[in-house]
Amino acid sequence: MHASLILAISLAGAITLSGATDGQACAGQSPSACDAAAVAEFTAGVQEYLQVRDTAAGHLPPERLFEDPTEMLIEREAMRQAIRDARPNARAGDLFTPRAAATIRRIVAETAAAQNVDPSDIVRDLRAERMHGAKRPVVNGGYDWRLGAWMWSALLQTLPPLPADLQYRIVSDDLVLIDVRASLVVDILEHAMVGDGD
């Protein structure tokens, strides 16, 4: 179903998305049309973030392989700081807008139902695997890899696709969007794993 939403977006072209709240944006629309608009809004936010990041990091050396891990960490921190400086007011919900959040929560609920899985079981398993001392993610902060690198594969297949540098992670019951190249938390959808309507 969600693959068809993404196809519908590409066929439909640009959609005007500014300003409306979730309820206003979906007024008079079918659920599939609302979902398509939500995915388009989220995708536009992702592309805008990448443009900001690429501009901010334009003066840094291109991505490469490092023989010295310390050098890699220094360059990664420089990229993070450049991005932070370029989006100093970044906050949760910038990309996971109310409309996108509602659609993603519905995707979580539908995926869990299709897989006969309780999302809270996924959350509990991930908490058990988290390394001691891991820091809770904060928008525009560094992603602490002690939180884990695993992602629920069934959900990955149904969430809006991301460009190569961005990935989803589940942390507690939140869905976190991270820039793996910068190890930066781009956005957080709080309580995403409770599903739609919980």
Image: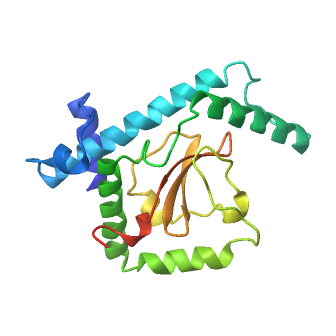
In the rendered image, which quarter contains the N terminus?
A: bottom left
Tell me: 150 left or right of 69: left
What residue is at 38 percent from the left and 57 percent from the top? 158
Q: Find residue 101 and report its image quarter.
A: bottom left
**Foreground of the two, 123 or 89:** 89
At x 77%, y 23%, the residue is 61
Please state the horizontal and vertical placement of residue 107, each as a whole percent of the image. 33, 61
Q: Is residue 44 above or below residue 22?
A: above
Task: Residue 93 in the image: state x and y as whole percent.
Answer: 43, 47
How is the rendered protein coloured? rainbow
At 19% from the left edge and 43% from the top edge, which residue is drawn? 25
Residue pushed farthest left? Answer: 28
Pick whichever, 134 or 21, lies toward us. 21
Q: Quadrant of the C terminus?
A: bottom left
Image location of residue 92, percent across then percent down: 48, 49
Residue ranking furthest to the front: 89
The answer to whether residue 33 shows anywhere in this view is: no
* In the depicted structure, whether residue 14 falls above or below residue 31: above
Could you tell me if residue 163 is visible in this image? yes
Q: Is residue 43 left or right of residue 23?
A: right
Q: How many marks?
A: 0
Between residue 15 and residue 135, name the one nearer to us. Answer: 135
Quarter holding residue 170: bottom right
Q: Position of residue 102 (x, y in %)?
A: 30, 56
The residue that appears at 39% across and 38% down in the rendered structure is: 43
